[in-house]
Image: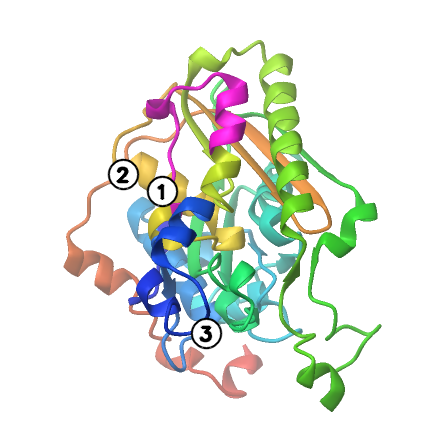
Amino acid sequence: MGKYMPHAVLANSDLVEIVDTSDEWIIERTGIRERRVVANGERQSDLAERASREALARVGWSPQDLDMIIVGTVTPDHLFPSSANTLAGKLGAIGTPSFDVLAACSGFLYALYQGMTVIESGRAKRVLVVGCDVMTSITNWDDRATCVLFGDGAGAILLEEVDEPLGIVDIVIGSDGRYFDLLNMPAGGSACPATHETVDKRMHKLHMQGKETYKLAVRIMEEVSTQLMDSCHVKSRDLACFIGHQANLRIIEAVTKRLGLKPEQVHNNIERYGNTTSATIPTCLYEAEMERKIKKGDWVLLVTFGAGLTWGGALMRWAADPLPILEEAAVADAVAGSYPEKLRPGRDWLKL
């Protein structure tokens, strides 16, 4: 696994200078104290590349070893080509199939589902799955209800086949398009192309109906978690680690209470990073592994929901050996992200 968070910190105290809010109000309503923000010129693909290079360095794979690259995101550098295509070019994974999955905050679980099934089919042996978003690029900084929620970040994982019964034991994804208007970006697609009017009305920014989204999120995350545990005959007490989508601490607490989980079974990072959309699950998983909260053979449950509405969950019997604790210099070298000479940006490398 790999993780990358931008260095710039946007604390609640900074938001107080932007909108009518307070540190106390934000913490009470969301559990968030600060979030990370990209620097000028830092792109979504840069975050994805750094997380991916760390993951590759930790396991000793080359980008050329990858059979597929899948990225979950709603904030690619461009509408097209895909973020995964851009990432493949930056990594130098020439010829590797790559595509994006657009499922909002469920993007990573949707991408994980695709990665797992392509390996099960025998069409691929090694797959890179990335959850990465720059949510501050579509945040309405005049809307105090939503601007306090989101941050930027990236998490990457590498998948390969393992012996049963370890690995992903069961995974589910789903959607209900009747609720598309609860959380969306009204303009920017073919139904409502960009105009001066849509820009002036902030229609290219995130819009959310918070109360309705909260209720659905709690119900769906509980149902998905229960479905997965029942299908695998696993009890809540058996879980070593539960990771829920980091949208709002109150949602996570409501879900874990309903499931009967203890605080030590749950890993969160929303306090430090806010809602990084597709990146919340993989970055939490990375941290839980690095902090040795999970070990080989442990039961791990991931569950998420997102705009659409979409949802997903994965129940795993942890198969990975402990991640090596790399020296900071080694990590820095891994994520440097320089192109090989013959693959520098431009048209020349297309000849390959």
Please determine whether, in this image, residue 55 is positioned above or below residue 300.
below
Report if residue 255 lies within the magenta region.
yes
Report if residue 84 lies within the magenta region.
no
In this image, 158 relative to 122: left or right? left
What residue is shown at x 37% (from left), y 34% (from top)? Answer: 267
User: CA separation, marks 2 and 3?
Assistant: 26 Å
Residue bearing the label numbered 2: 290
Q: Nearer the viewer, residue 137 or 199?
A: 199
Q: From the image, which quarter does the N terminus lie in?
A: top left
Amino acid at dot 3: Arg
Q: On residue 286, which mark appears?
A: 1
Q: Nearer the viewer, residue 66 or 40?
A: 40
User: CA separation, marks 1 and 2?
Assistant: 6 Å
Task: Say few, some or many: other residues with alpha carbon within 10 Å of mark 2 (under 14 / 14 to 19 / 20 or more).
Answer: some
Q: How many marks do you count on the picture? A: 3
- Contact between marks 3 and 1 (CB within 8 A): the answer is no
Q: On residue 43, which mark appears?
A: 3
Task: Say few, some or many: other residues with alpha carbon within 10 Å of mark 3 (under 14 / 14 to 19 / 20 or more).
Answer: some
- Contact between marks 1 and 2 (CB within 8 A): the answer is yes
The answer to whether residue 130 shows anywhere in this view is: no
Q: Nearer the viewer, residue 222 or 80?
A: 222
x, y percent for residue 313: 59, 33
Please determine whether, in this image, residue 3 is positioned above or below residue 338.
above
